[in-house]
Image (cartoon, rainbow, N blue to C red):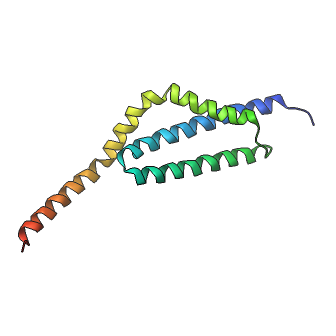
Amino acid sequence: MGVQIPEQLAQFFLSILLGTVLGLLYDLLRAVRLRGGRGRGHVLDAAYCRAAAGSVVLFVLSGDGELRLFELAGSLGGAVLYFCLPGPALRPLWDFWLDVLLAPVGLVEHLLGKILEICKKAFSF
């Protein structure tokens, strides 16, 4: 059984893609983490670590079942490429869409606060 360079090269490029996707997921969760408290940030970080570890394990198992250093380097390189090239340009986009999605929640909180204020005035003892 010899060394199959084209297969290893394909695994390397797939590991770069995996690192890029993991970087994108981390960036999406960053926008949510910034709007929450510390507790939400810890929960999201733990969920990200589980998802990243699970995806790396599934990626390794889909190949030969052994983790090779070039796969780790490719994953790390893919994440670095994402954070250096499209990451800074996409961060305002994620922030904008999260604000758009959370606008109804803010409106409901505002209305509930007004209703609570009216109830406190009406039922004050």
Q: Is residue 112 left or right of residue 31?
A: left
Determine the image quadrant of residue 94: top left
In x, y percent, where is residue 25? 51, 42
Farthest residue, direction top? 85
Question: Foreground residue, 75 or 38?
Answer: 38
In x, y percent, where is residue 18? 62, 38
* Residue 14 visible in the snapshot: no
Farthest residue, direction right? 1
85 versus 17 height, above or below: above
Q: Is residue 122 left or right of residue 61?
A: left
Q: Is residue 27 left or right of residue 72?
A: left
Question: Foreground residue, 69 or 28?
Answer: 69
In x, y percent, where is residue 3? 87, 32
In x, y percent, where is residue 92? 37, 32
Dividing the image into 4 quarters, which one contains the N terminus?
A: top right
Residue occupying image coordinates x 78% and y 32%? 8
Residue occupying image coordinates x 52% and y 26%? 84
